[in-house]
């Protein structure tokens, strides 16, 4: 009976969500269909359409929240829907109207979506009796329940598919990802919307203050933490966070004069810690016990201490590695966390709506031209690149000049800046390189040192590969095999074996990595020919550099004696650190003729 009641309530919730968010439901169906088509045909890419549909979904949800909170007339919601679609269209035309979307636009769009999510959390608490922490808790519980049940459904379907595939008949492997598309792109968001409470708005207050009070009482069921969550937060997560905080503080104090300022991993760890602390702070707003009281009183003060050092750490690194958009957001978030901690300290009993407003303002600033993360990081990396080049005498009258004496630290700084600018498609903003500059092919010709070298000891490294358009003649040979040829003086003495038969005689090919030796034996075990590693070393030792293409005449090594004729065709060859003499790997065809 309880199961039927639960199903009935869930079905009712789905119907209410569809009526409450009609445009959102339509957009989710369209997004699901696009994903279905792209999964079915991998040549179809809808990344730009998926991003703009996701943006439209968020804007349509915000339209409903704004309408419920601030307006009373029925005509307002369709107008808000039209505005959201129009804004999405404008954004598509300006930024997403391309087959290939670069990293800047992708990250910018994802951050915009996150900003809209913060607005979604904040709107119910604007000039309302609802606190931001209550909206946060209601959304958190809805997301958790939604993901839990969606995960259970996906796991169950996967097990059913596996059973059918193993016991009855073969299934197309795409069925798993297609099901995930339906469950997580269509079902999960609709289920999430069905779990969202209705917040008291202008329309409700206009109808009746009593109705608004009843709605607030009912809202308590959504915003009050469950007993399980209360225990989890109070007696597990807060103590664990306390221990981790002690470790962080001790580490900072011990290493304040050394590794703290150069540990890249610590920066990510500190940001993760700050996020978790702020989330916990909002989740425990309605929990009253000794652990939560101590957390609310103590952790904001500790947060200020950690955030201060973390932000100074990130700012110092700008002078060394320049500013990237990632570090911009690290510093921005540090500033946000510092101000949030001050709000928690000086207004401990307030609604803390200012925290959401602050985050929205900072995120909006970060997406603006000139002040935003991407323009500032671009200018910072170009400035750092120009300064490094000028300091080493490599940029004169806005023209690049080779400097054979440049140190490895400066090389790495140039490589890092160029890598970031290339990744973000900013190379056309560099005035001292040509418009047709190819980052991978032209780097060494322009800067005078290889793109991938990190230290001078790698000067013996080599990478060669065979031009794919070459034709290999095999008519004069009996057998052909493809094999990996290793030569490493540090390898164990292990062999790879191949066997073939001609005129009822068995022949054996052995490849020994430690000795760098290829041996062909006859059926009696007698050696017919040996090919030592020096054969390859002698041919390719004159080559230097990376990513060199070979014609067929450069890739072929021919050997012959009275027993065997061999043609070795090198497909690709790599050596690292110690060079060809001590270490190389090759993939090659071996063509063999028994005389």
Image: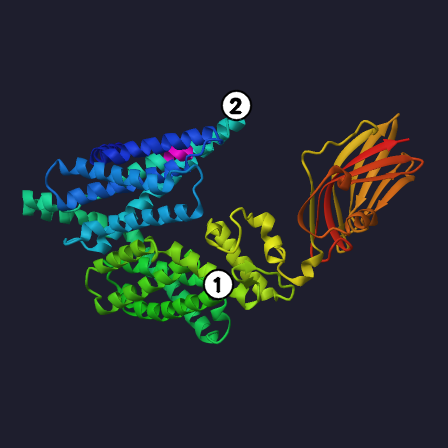
- Describe the element under mark 2 as helix, strand or loop: loop
Q: Position of residue 542 (x, y in %)?
A: 77, 52
Mark 2 packing: few (<14 Cα in 10 Å), some, or many (20+)? few
How far apart are the two marked residues, 1 and 2, measured between alpha carbons? Answer: 61 Å
Q: Which residue does the image show at 83% across and 29% down from the upper left?
A: 477
Let me know if residue 3 appears in the view.
no
- Picture quadrant of residue 287: bottom left
Residue 196 or residue 343, whichever sits in front: 343
**Residue 9 position (above or below residue 540):** above
Q: Main secondary structure of the magenta part?
A: helix
Q: Which residue does the image show at 46% across and 33% down from the upper left?
A: 176
Determine the residue located farthest toward the right in the rendered image. 562
Q: Which residues are magenta?
A: 179-184
Q: Position of residue 380 (x, y in %)?
A: 44, 61
- Picture quadrant of residue 25: top left
Whether the residues at callouts 1 and 2 have beta carbons within 8 Å, the answer is no
Residue 234 belongs to magenta span:
no
Determine the residue located farthest toward the front in the rendered image. 397
Q: Please give the residue where the numbered disc 1 appears in the rendered image.
A: 384
- Describe the element under mark 1 as helix, strand or loop: helix
N-terminal-most mark, 1 or 2: 2
Which quarter shows the C terminus?
A: top right
Residue 286 or residue 104, whichever sits in front: 104
Q: Please give the residue where the numbered disc 2 appears in the rendered image.
A: 169
**Residue 202 position (above or below residue 18):** below
């Amino acid at each position: 009976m309880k199961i039927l009641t639960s199903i009935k309530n869930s079905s009712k919730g789905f119907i209410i969500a569809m009526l409450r968010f009609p445009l959102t439901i339509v957009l989710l169906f369209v997004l699901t269909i696009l994903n279905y088509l792209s999964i079915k045909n991998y040549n179809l890419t809808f990344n730009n359409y998926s991003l703009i549909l996701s943006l439209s979904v968020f804007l349509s949800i915000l339209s409903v929240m704004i309408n419920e909170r601030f307006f009373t007339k029925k005509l307002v919601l369709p107008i808000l829907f039209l505005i959201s679609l129009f804004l999405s269209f404008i954004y598509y035309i300006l930024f997403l109207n391309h087959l290939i979307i670069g990293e800047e636009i992708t990250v910018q769009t994802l951050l915009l979506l996150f900003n809209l999510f913060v607005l979604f959390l904040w709107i119910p608490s604007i000039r309302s009796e609802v606190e931001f922490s209550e909206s946060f808790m209601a959304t958190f519980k809805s997301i958790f329940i939604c993901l839990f049940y969606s995960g259970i459904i996906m796991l169950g379907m996967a097990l059913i598919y596996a059973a059918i595939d193993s016991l009855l008949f073969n299934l197309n492997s795409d069925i798993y990802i297609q099901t995930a598309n339906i469950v997580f792109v269509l079902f999960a968001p609709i289920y999430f919307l069905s779990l969202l409470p209705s917040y008291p708005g202008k329309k409700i207050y206009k109808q009746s203050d009593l109705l608004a009070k009843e709605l607030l009482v009912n809202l308590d069921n959504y915003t009050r933490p469950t007993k399980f969550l209360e225990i989890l937060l109070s007696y597990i997560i807060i103590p664990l966070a306390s221990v981790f905080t002690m470790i962080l503080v001790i580490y900072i104090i011990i290493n304040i004069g050394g590794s703290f300022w150069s540990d890249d991993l610590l920066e990510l760890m500190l940001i993760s810690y700050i996020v978790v602390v702020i989330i916990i702070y909002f989740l425990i707003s309605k929990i009253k016990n000794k652990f939560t009281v101590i957390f609310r009183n103590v952790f904001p003060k500790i947060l200020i201490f950690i955030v201060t050092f973390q932000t100074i750490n990130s700012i110092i690194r700008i002078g060394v590695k320049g500013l990237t958009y990632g570090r911009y957001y690290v510093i921005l978030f540090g500033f946000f966390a510092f101000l949030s901690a001050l709000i928690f300290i000086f207004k401990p009993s307030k609604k803390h709506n200012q925290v959401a407003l602050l985050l929205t303002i900072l995120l909006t600033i970060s997406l603006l031209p000139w002040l935003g993360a991407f323009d500032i990081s671009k200018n910072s990396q170009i400035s750092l690149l120009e300064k490094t080049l000028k300091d080493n005498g490599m940029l004169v009258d806005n023209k690049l000049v080779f400097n054979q004496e440049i140190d490895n630290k400066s090389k790495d700084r140039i490589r890092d800046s160029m890598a970031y600018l290339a990744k973000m498609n900013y190379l056309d903003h560099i005035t001292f390189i040509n418009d047709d500059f190819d980052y991978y092919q032209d780097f060494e010709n322009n800067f005078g040192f290889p793109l991938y070298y990190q230290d001078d000891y790698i000067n013996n490294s080599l990478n060669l590969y065979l031009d794919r358009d070459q034709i290999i003649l095999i008519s004069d040979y009996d057998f052909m095999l493809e094999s990996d040829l290793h030569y490493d003086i540090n390898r164990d003495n292990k062999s790879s074996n191949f066997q073939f038969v001609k005129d009822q005689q068995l022949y054996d090919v052995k490849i020994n990595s430690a000795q760098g030796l290829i041996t062909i034996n006859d059926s009696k075990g007698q050696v017919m020919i040996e090919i030592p590693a020096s054969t390859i070393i002698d041919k390719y030792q004159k080559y230097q550099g990376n990513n060199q293409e070979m014609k067929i005449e450069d890739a072929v090594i021919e050997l012959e004696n009275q027993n065997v004729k061999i043609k070795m065709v090198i497909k690709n060859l790599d050596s690292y650190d110690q060079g060809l003499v001590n270490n190389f790997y090759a993939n090659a065809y071996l063509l063999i003729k028994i005389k």
